[in-house]
Amino acid sequence: MALIHYREQLVRMRLNQIMWQPYEADFGHFPDFCVTGRDTWTARVSLVCFCIVETHHPNRVLRQFGLVQGRLDYVVYDERLHRINLRGKVEKNWREEHGPYILTWGMRQQQVCHAPLQIGEMPHDHDYYRWYRLVT
């Protein structure tokens, strides 16, 4: 029942009710180490923590970074990565196991999403909206 309620609220929202960058105003209050490297926040890389690998897809939410959202490409999903658990893998060398994913992190400066700054609202005939209407 709650899900239906929230879906109805989302459907009724108007563009001027959406806060695309809700934390932007707070960044000035954070210590420097929290916001250092902001240029890499939009890097399409793998995030690795021992046995866990998650692909970061900031290109799918560019509006949250103040950038123009473009059409989205297909996401490659490696189901094998989500089946990994630590049972019986005490001696596993995760650095070796996830070497290719760690390399993508090392090359994050080359993986940054580039898009123009979003100024004002996107027009209703924007390429992203045309694509979105086709796939939803």
Image (cartoon, rainbow, N blue to C red):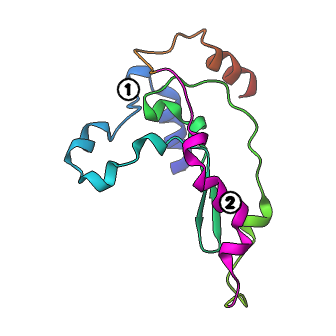
Q: Is residue 79 above or below residue 65?
A: below
Image mark for residue 129: none
Q: Quadrant of the C terminus?
A: top right
Crowding at dot 2, Cα within 10 Å, few <14 / some 14-19 / many 20+, comes out as some
Task: Name the foreground residue: 99 vs 66.
Answer: 99
Q: Which residue does the numbered mark 2 point to in the structure image?
A: 101
Q: Residue at x 40, y 43 (%)?
A: 38
Q: Position of residue 16 (x, y in %)?
A: 38, 21
Disc 2 vs disc 1: which is toward the camera?
A: 2
Residue 46 appears left or right of 96: left
Q: CA distance from mark 2 to mark 1?
A: 38 Å
The vertical placement of 45 against 64, above or below, is below
Q: Is residue 39 magenta?
A: no
User: 127 or 111: nearer the eye?
Assistant: 111
How packed is label 1: few (under 14 Cα within 10 Å), some, or many (20 or more)? few
Secondary structure of the residue carrying tag 1 is helix
Mark 2 vs 1: CB contact within 8 A: no
Say which residue label 1 marks: 17
The amino acid pointed to by label 1 is Gln
The question of residue 99 being in magenta is answered with: yes
- Residue 95 percent across, percent down from the top left: 65, 73
Q: Where's residue 120, x and y in %?
A: 40, 14
Kindly identify the residue that appears in the image at 71 percent across and 74 percent down: 96
The residue lying at 30 percent from left, 55 percent from top is 33
Query: Does the magenta stretch mainly form a helix, a strand or a loop?
Result: helix
In depth, the one of 13 and 33 nearer the eye is: 33
The kind of secondary structure element at disc 2 is helix
x and y percentages locating residue 55 in the rendered image: 64, 53
The magenta-colored residue range is: 91-116
Q: Amino acid at mark 2?
A: Tyr
